Amino acid sequence: MMRKLPSPTITCSLFIVIVLIATVCTPAIGAAAATTTSASGSESIPKPPSASDGHRIVDNTRLESTPVTTSKRVQVGGWSQAQYKQPAGDIVTVSLNLSATVNTTAGNIANQTSTRSHAYVQLGSVSAGFIDVLRVEDADGDGEVSFSINTRTLGTSNSISATASDIVYHSDGDIVHSGVHGRLSTADNSPTFVGPDGSELSDFDAYLAALGLINSASEHGIDQLQRPLQPGKYRISASTAGGFRAEYPDTQPSAEDGSEDLRAKPTTSIIGEATIELRKPGLGNVSVQTAPAGPADTAPNQTALVHSITETRSVTSTDRLVITAEATGIYGHLVAIEGDFASLSTGFDPGTLSQLEGRTGEGIGFAVKSNDGPVLQGPGSSEGVESLLEVLDLSTADATEVSVYANNTAGKLYVVIDPRSIDGFTLDNDSRQQFSASLSYTSPSTAPFLFDREDQHIQSYHRGLVGGAGGDIDTPAFPYFEPGENDTKTVQFSLVKPRVEFKGNDGWARSDTSITVNRGSPTRIQGKTNVAPGTEGVLQVKFQEGDSSFAFLQQSTVTVAPDGTFSGTFDLPEVTTNETTTLSLLVADTEIAHTEMTVVSPKHSQTAQSTQTAVVSVESDTSMGESDGSTPGFTPLVAVLALIVVFTLVFVSQREK
């Protein structure tokens, strides 16, 4: 008996379902196949290296940062470095290990180490035209002697004494005695000096005379130089014994020794030789930064200052203004004027930089000028202001108004200004004013810098340290430039009023526009501003209920983030709901912005938000359906279920028939 075939209607329905399933599933299958092919394509993606291939396995989704290998500083004998490099006119710091191997005789090294408390050092050479002999003592007992050398004042005198060394050599924990600066001990452990004939000389000055560095023993060590130590290489030798000899070389002088007829060196027990290389100083870029509000001397040292500044060309009148100059060759002179080495870390008085400028022969100038028009200085203006456009008088400012920091190692000078305390930075009705800052080194004349030595033994004020072109203290000549060489670096910047925006329920609004916020537990209020990142301020909410005497005040400490935003939290009482309060931002106890703020109930806001969320959800579903051209809700799983239902219906129909 023949089985009866399904009816045409059922067959057609089944065909439609199969076609529909194929239509829905094919793109998904094709996409999966394409993804699989792409992921498994061995020809398009090279095999990643493995450890067995001799390569490091790295994450190829980002660039690999490989550390740069730098050569280690080579220690020569007892010195911590073979070469100490620093621009001329700045500070060089050296370190000597007193337990280093001893060279007991010329060319013969004995592997001897012992604990020593002192050593003798010779700095310079006959070919360099300058020599100083030091006795250094390990006063802190760490087995080393570390000390700094002011290369601008070395071999000079100051107003106090021709032999004062406080502005020449400095050590935090050890002791340094200098032959040039008159503090070599006369006790049994003082060094001895021998002439070329082998006879013992009377003192250090006789040693210099025997070497031809001064005319006679009646002159002194400070008479060796006619200008500060110039760029070049200077040998520095250390010995455990205090014997120094002027002698003729046994062979033809080497290139290192120059063409000197005599050489000078320790006679025995050399524990190390190194070189101080002084490079030519100069100017780099001048830039402007901003720092959080406060007195100019807020930072305890230059390190703290650098950590607080942000690069900018626009500084608010509330912030500290920082002018940074890449400059070398001036820190030794600044130390000499300030009178101590500690100022390299803690900062200089503004009058120190003003005094350096005032020494016209040095050829250094610093100025901050207004670009928007003349600034009336009025009668009796200080000599520290040379132009009607100049707005900064360093000679009359105190450290809270202007402070100067230095980084001798990096070669950077920082001038910090508190605009709130300087009349020339008052904006009044203007919201913005343009300025320029410049630093210059000049040597315009035909003669190089020379010391003024006319009364070197009388020691009038600062004679022996200052100078100028050809010795004229009134004619500029930067000590390390050739005649006619000049350099000036300038930066332009703006001083602006602080701006603040607060975020309400309707988005960001300027501080002069009222906002509405939801009362929460707690209530978080956001803002953004152009004042310096890192600024600590106070966000304040003030409310007074009607005509009553009840007043409500809350404050929240805020910190301005690098992107200029800040936020505070408040525990607003119920009574503030649907009322208007005053929202303010205070910086350094001064209000810089305020606005009216209306506090609303969060319930109403939540209801509105829920309705909006539901609408967005529906719209999102619709747009997703339109974006891929598929039937909403008709997934491959639903299609399979539909197929099962159809086959079930067909089967039941056949059984019934």
Image: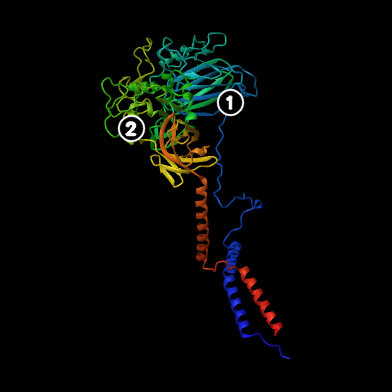
Query: What crowding class fits label 2: few (fewer than 14 Cα within 10 Å), some (14-19), or many (20 or more)?
Result: some
- Locate the N terminus and report the quarter of the image it occupies: bottom right
**Residue at x 54% of width, y 13% of height:** 191
Q: Which mark is residue 77?
A: 1
Q: Which residue is mark 2?
A: 427
Image position of 450 (left or right of 18):
left
Image position of 656 (left or right of 42):
right
- Of circles 1 and 2, the one toward us is 2
Viewer-side residue, 627 vs 361: 627
Residue kind at label 2, given as amino acid type? Leu
Residue kind at label 1, given as amino acid type? Gly
Outermost residue, right direction?
1
Residue 72 is situated, as x and y percent measured from the top left of the image, at: 56, 34
Q: Image quadrant of residue 427?
A: top left
Residue 76 is situated, as x and y percent measured from the top left of the image, at: 57, 28
Q: Image quadrant of residue 361?
A: top left
Residue 124 is situated, as x and y percent measured from the top left of the image, at: 47, 22
Q: Specify which label sits upstream in the sequence, 1 or 2.
A: 1
The local secondary structure at tag 1 comes to loop
* Residue 25 seen: yes
432 w.r.t. 618: above or below: above
Quote the CA–CA distance across marks 1 and 2.
61 Å
* Residue 252 seen: no
